[in-house]
């Protein structure tokens, strides 16, 4: 019954991610995405639509995250739900850069 909860993932290959690109990766059992924005900002989100659980995609040309299942749209920087059926934002993850890798971790729970 004990499922190990993943709290951190190291992505050395992400250090080479070009500006404006996104990398899909697994955060535990869930798909997640790391976005390297054109202004060099890094954002990581759980890539599961809050509507019905479809996997979302980053659309860099439109600077948004899109769910093809029912047309849900999210803010590519905050994960906020912008339009369509999604009831809540995407779950954000923390991003830390080191010389050799990108470390993505669960945000500390706020009480």
Image (cartoon, grey):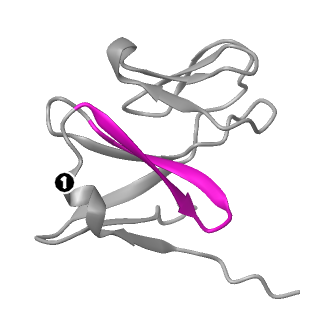
Image quadrant holding the C terminus, namely bottom right
Above or below for 11 versus 20: below
From the viewer's perspective, tell me whether residue 98 is left or right of residue 85: left
Where is residue 108? Give x, y as percent. 48, 66
Q: In percent of the image, x 68 and y 83: which residue is there? A: 4
Image quadrant holding the N terminus, namely bottom right
Residue with the most extreme left position: 99
Q: In percent of the image, x 71 and y 35: which residue is there? A: 50
Above or below for 78 versus 28: above
Is residue 22 inside the magenta stretch? yes
Q: Secondary structure at mark 1?
A: helix
Residue with the most extreme bottom position: 2
Above or below for 106 versus 22: below
Where is residue 61? Give x, y as percent. 34, 15
Q: Nearer the viewer, residue 29 or 85?
A: 29
Q: Nearer the viewer, residue 45 or 17?
A: 17
Residue with the most extreme right position: 1
Above or below for 52 versus 5: above
Residue at label 1? 16
Query: In this picture, which residue range is highlighted in magenta?
Result: 20-36
Q: In percent of the image, x 16 and y 72: which residue is there? A: 100
């Amino acid at each position: 019954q004990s499922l190990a909860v993943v709290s951190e993932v190291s992505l050395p290959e992400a250090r080479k991610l070009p500006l404006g690109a996104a990398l899909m990766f697994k955060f535990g059992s869930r798909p997640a995405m790391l976005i390297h924005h054109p202004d060099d900002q890094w954002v990581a989100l759980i890539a599961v639509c809050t509507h019905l659980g479809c996997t979302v995609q980053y659309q860099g040309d439109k600077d948004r995250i899109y769910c093809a299942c029912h047309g849900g749209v999210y803010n590519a920087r905050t994960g906020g739900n912008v339009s369509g059926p999604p009831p809540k934002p995407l779950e954000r993850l923390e991003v830390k850069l080191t010389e050799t890798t990108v470390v993505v971790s669960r945000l500390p729970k706020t009480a």
